């Protein structure tokens, strides 16, 4: 039951609204009550905790609606306290109250009809929302200040919140219930000083939140795409995006409706988690390839030590410049959905020409699902010169470094740079980022920067670049963002910026809870970074409880890369729990990288003589001749790169003590077994299949309604039939085959159905309706591969350029009254037609059939159009002509130039 009591005369600022509400109050409640349940959402907005809109932005939005005004100096002055008159106007405007004139209910000095505040004060009085501060003397006190607890009372009554049974806030006794109710509703933070005056900032933000709840979203959801089972990227109508984290994982292939908030509004979107696939592969410049996926990718499946793993993604030269993909620099974006490969073997390793991009199914998502194999053909002709993307310089007081990031990788040699006219040395930091070392540069100062002879790898040279750089001053000490234990003897310390790893050596102590120092932490990280990995001292041991709680003490001289130090010693609590659990095998896979065994935690290899035996599940016998002499270990993965020749299902019997974990005790692995499937045989076959020729004969297709290309292909070991049958392995006019195309394979090697396919004809059928006009058009077979993944080179025998005949039926598309002669009805077809006769059409005028007396082809601007004259109508724009419909009859001789019959029964309206 709501408490509708209100303060005594001395403390009364607002009228009790118990019973007998007026119509206007009902209007307010109809708006307010509809949003009551959602108020917790904008509580942070109202009181600045995680605001989507700043107080100034809120003020600007409300001012634009006439709800608020600035001061005479044009400023919002959000820092000022709000007066009762100002509050009365906000309440009036916000809830759409009717301003009241011709009435003076109060006796304040200056309270007269010319006072700007009177219509608003009378409005809130009439609505029973506010009344005088002194009802006996009739004083409203319009220049008096509004307190937070008074604002809370208005919200309590307007929203009809429930009176809480207990209170814990700073409000006056009369307002504690109101204050607690709005706290419980999420409107006001409990720590707020309710007795304090309400600032304009506080009330403006609250009013903005209320106003926004009644505004329908102006944005709409344009698309929603799942990049992982628990992450969806939503794109809005203004092309902005938001990543929505889901608490319940999506199920692949099942459409699911998700709900989320964006800019303080509620939205829903339907999303289906698609099977992992490649969306596109394209070259933004001559030095880089960007492969986009529809799901987040496991970096370790494509990248090793920042390099592209061999054979996971192939770039096969069809024509033009050859590049080396394996070992090139590779990186994923923050969402894990875009892989950027930078070809950096040498200066001459760049893209120019046509390439077949092959992405293997060894690429895995973060959830371990294989990405479907993908092949596409790209053409690269980079003719755009590089530009400066970003330039910056940061210093404590002075520096000699300026960092320039270009729009693409550029050649490291030959760049000439100067800063304020002084020659600067140029150093390559990364493919697209260079540092300029100049003289002394002072923080807070802007300098001119000149760059000439900047060339990309396609030899596009930028025009001389003249820009400026402002040296930003950074004198702030680094701060710790987080401390995260890694196993039971390592911790990662993350800072808000890059720090000097050398400054941590001997400078971080580990203390027990009683303050006794155990020793100094060892620094594992060996390069400047924002995250430093530390290891417990060698004499550290766990207490009997297995849990250690102590303190990391950072010395005052720990510094960032600019030299800013902590200044004073800093202590941070740390807890470590003893790890006594042995590492276990999570999975085993086999592919181009060899045999990969993945454990449930990071491991180190033990030279214990432990062996791995491989059992062929089909025969039950051990596989001999496997080379386990070479291994690599990284994180939780143990890889035997020389294990080759597996095909089928196997069971691995792994001896104990093969690896140990990274714990203080170094727990050793136990004996175990694990199943591995080697579905793809790693082959020594490096020879590409060959396209020996393509034939095409007009009218000789084996499938009615289709044209046919016959692609003859062979391989000495075995063709990959799936690539032959994949219509995306072929292009027509540099585009994908028209919809409805398909491929049939005819085996020509005479082998048994179970034997390797060595020679074949891929019969490519393209619907005649996919050929829009008669012309010579190039057909290319570019994606044909063998079972080892080698892709055929596109030679002249893999390209055919026949003259294809238009197979698209013409269609009547429009009819209009001729602008130059209103006695003519002008028809437009989808293409040029012939054999048009007056009897080919049925024309209805005002619903009645009329005779077509003539039909003739237009000239000049009406070329390729046809004019009809109708019996009895010399002016088709006359007032008595209301509707004209034209229908193409079924029996007609109309054809296009290629001889395709016109589409019959097509109806169009002229008016």
Image: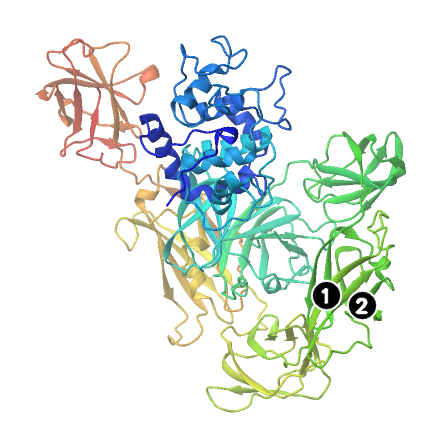
Residue at coordinates 44% horizontally, 53% vertically from top-left?
728
How far apart marks 2 and 1 lie (CA) works out to: 9 Å
Task: Kindly identify which residue carries mark 1.
Answer: 574
Task: Please say whether residue 160 is visible from this viewpoint.
Answer: yes
Element carrying mark 1? strand
Dot 2 crowding, Cα within 10 Å, few <14, some 14–19, many 20+: many
* Count of picture labels: 2
Q: Nearer the viewer, residue 796 or 810?
A: 810
Q: Where 823 sits versus 851, above or below? A: above
Element carrying mark 2? strand
Q: Position of residue 717 (x, y in %)?
A: 51, 72
What's the coloring here? rainbow
Q: Where 600 sits versus 108, above or below? A: below
Task: Kindly identify which residue carries mark 2.
Answer: 510
Query: Which quarter of the rendered picture does the C terminus lie within?
Result: top left
Q: Position of residue 235 (x, y in %)?
A: 48, 42
Is residue 462 shown left or right of residue 562?
Answer: left
Is residue 820 shown left or right of residue 273?
Answer: left
Is residue 607 shown left or right of residue 370?
Answer: right
Residue at coordinates 75% horizontally, 44% vertically from top-left?
433
Which numbered marker is on residue 604? none
Dot 1 crowding, Cα within 10 Å, few <14, some 14–19, many 20+: some
**Which residue sits furthest front?**
136
Q: Nearer the viewer, residue 743 or 21?
A: 21
Of pointers 2 and 1, the one earlier in the residue sequence: 2
Which of the 4 quarters of the picture holds residue 331?
Answer: bottom right
Callouts 2 and 1 close, C-beta under 8 Å: yes
């Amino acid at each position: 039951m709501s408490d509708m009591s209100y303060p005594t005369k001395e403390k009364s600022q607002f009228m009790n609204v118990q019973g007998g509400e007026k119509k206007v109050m009902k209007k307010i409640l109809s708006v307010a009550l509809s949003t009551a349940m959602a108020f917790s959402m904008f509580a942070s907005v109202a009181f600045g905790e995680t605001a989507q809109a700043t107080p100034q932005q809120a003020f600007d939005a409300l001012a634009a609606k006439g709800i608020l005004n600035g001061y005479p100096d044009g400023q919002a002055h959000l820092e000022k306290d709000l007066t009762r008159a100002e509050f009365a106007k906000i309440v009036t405007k916000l809830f759409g109250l009717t301003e009241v004139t011709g009435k003076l209910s109060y006796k304040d000095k200056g309270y007269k009809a010319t006072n700007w505040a009177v219509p608003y004060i009378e409005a809130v009085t009439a609505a029973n929302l506010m009344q005088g501060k002194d009802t006996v003397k009739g004083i409203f006190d319009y220049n008096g200040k509004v307190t937070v607890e008074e604002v809370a009372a208005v919200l309590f009554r307007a929203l009809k919140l429930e009176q809480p049974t207990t209170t814990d806030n700073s409000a006056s006794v009369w307002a504690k219930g109101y204050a607690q109710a709005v706290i419980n509703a999420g409107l006001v933070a409990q720590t707020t000083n309710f007795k304090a005056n309400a600032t304009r900032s506080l009330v403006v933000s609250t009013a903005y939140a209320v106003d926004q709840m009644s505004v329908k979203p102006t944005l709409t959801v344009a698309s929603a795409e799942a990049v992982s089972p628990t992450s969806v990227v939503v794109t809005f109508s203004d092309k902005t995006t938001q990543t929505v984290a889901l608490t319940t994982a999506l199920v692949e292939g099942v459409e699911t409706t998700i709900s989320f908030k964006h800019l303080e509004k509620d939205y829903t979107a339907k999303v289906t988690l698609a099977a992992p696939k490649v969306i596109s592969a394209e070259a933004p410049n001559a030095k880089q390839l960007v492969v986009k996926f529809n799901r987040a990718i496991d970096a370790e499946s494509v990248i090793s030590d920042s390099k592209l793993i061999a054979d996971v993604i192939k770039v096969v030269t069809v024509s033009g410049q050859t590049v080396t993909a394996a070992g090139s620099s590779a990186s994923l974006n923050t969402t894990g959905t875009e892989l950027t490969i930078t070809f950096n073997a040498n200066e001459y390793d760049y893209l120019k020409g046509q390439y077949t991009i092959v992405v293997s199914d060894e690429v895995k998502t973060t959830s371990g699902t294989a990405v479907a194999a993908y092949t596409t053909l790209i053409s690269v002709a980079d003719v755009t010169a590089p530009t400066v993307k970003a330039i910056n310089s940061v210093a404590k007081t002075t520096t000699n470094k300026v960092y320039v990031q270009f729009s693409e990788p550029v050649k490291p040699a030959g760049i000439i740079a100067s800063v304020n006219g002084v020659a600067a040395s140029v150093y390559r930091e990364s493919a697209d980022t260079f540092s300029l070392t100049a003289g002394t540069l002072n923080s807070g100062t802007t300098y001119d920067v000149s760059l000439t002879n900047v060339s990309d790898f396609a030899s596009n040279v930028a025009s001389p670049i003249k820009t400026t750089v402002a040296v930003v001053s950074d004198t702030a000490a680094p701060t710790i963002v987080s401390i995260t234990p890694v196993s039971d003897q390592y911790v990662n310390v993350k800072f808000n910026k890059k720090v000097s790893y050398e400054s941590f050596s001997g400078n971080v102590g580990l203390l027990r809870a009683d303050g006794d120092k155990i020793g100094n932490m060892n620094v594992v990280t060996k390069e400047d970074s924002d995250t430093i990995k530390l290891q417990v001292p060698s004499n550290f041991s766990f207490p009997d409880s297995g849990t250690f709680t102590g303190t990391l003490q950072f010395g005052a001289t720990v510094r960032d890369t600019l030299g800013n130090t902590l200044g004073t010693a800093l202590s941070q609590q740390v807890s470590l729990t003893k790890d006594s659990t042995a590492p276990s095998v999570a999975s085993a896979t086999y592919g181009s990288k060899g045999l990969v065994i993945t454990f449930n935690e990071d491991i180190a290899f033990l030279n214990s003589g432990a062996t791995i035996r491989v059992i062929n599940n089909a025969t039950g016998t051990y596989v001999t001749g496997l080379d386990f002499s070479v291994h690599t270990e990284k994180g939780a993965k143990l890889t035997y790169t020389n294990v080759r020749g597996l095909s089928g299902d196997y069971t691995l019997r792994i001896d104990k003590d093969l690896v140990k974990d990274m714990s203080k005790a170094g727990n050793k692995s136990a004996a175990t077994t694990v199943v591995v499937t080697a579905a793809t045989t790693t082959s020594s076959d490096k020879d590409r299949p060959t396209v020996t020729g393509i034939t095409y004969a007009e009218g000789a297709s084996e499938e009615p309604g289709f044209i046919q290309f016959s692609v003859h292909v062979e391989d000495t070991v075995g063709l990959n039939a799936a690539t032959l049958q994949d219509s995306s392995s072929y292009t027509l006019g540099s585009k994908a085959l028209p919809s409805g195309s398909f491929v049939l394979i005819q085996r020509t090697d005479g082998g048994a159905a179970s034997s390797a396919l060595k020679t074949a004809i891929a019969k490519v059928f393209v619907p005649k309706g996919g050929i829009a006009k008669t012309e010579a058009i190039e057909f290319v077979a570019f994606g044909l591969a063998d079972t080892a993944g080698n892709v055929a080179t596109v030679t002249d025998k893999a390209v055919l350029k026949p003259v294809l005949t238009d197979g698209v039926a013409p269609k009547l598309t429009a009819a209009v009254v001729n602008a130059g002669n209103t006695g003519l009805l002008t028809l437009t077809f989808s293409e040029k037609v012939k054999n048009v006769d007056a009897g080919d059409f049925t024309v209805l005028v005002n619903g009645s059939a009329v005779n077509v007396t003539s039909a003739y082809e237009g000239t000049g601007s009406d070329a390729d159009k046809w004019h009809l004259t109708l019996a009895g109508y010399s002016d088709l724009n006359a007032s008595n002509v209301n509707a004209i419909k034209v229908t193409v009859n079924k029996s007609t001789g109309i054809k296009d130039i290629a001889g395709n019959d016109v589409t019959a029964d097509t109806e169009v309206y002229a008016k």
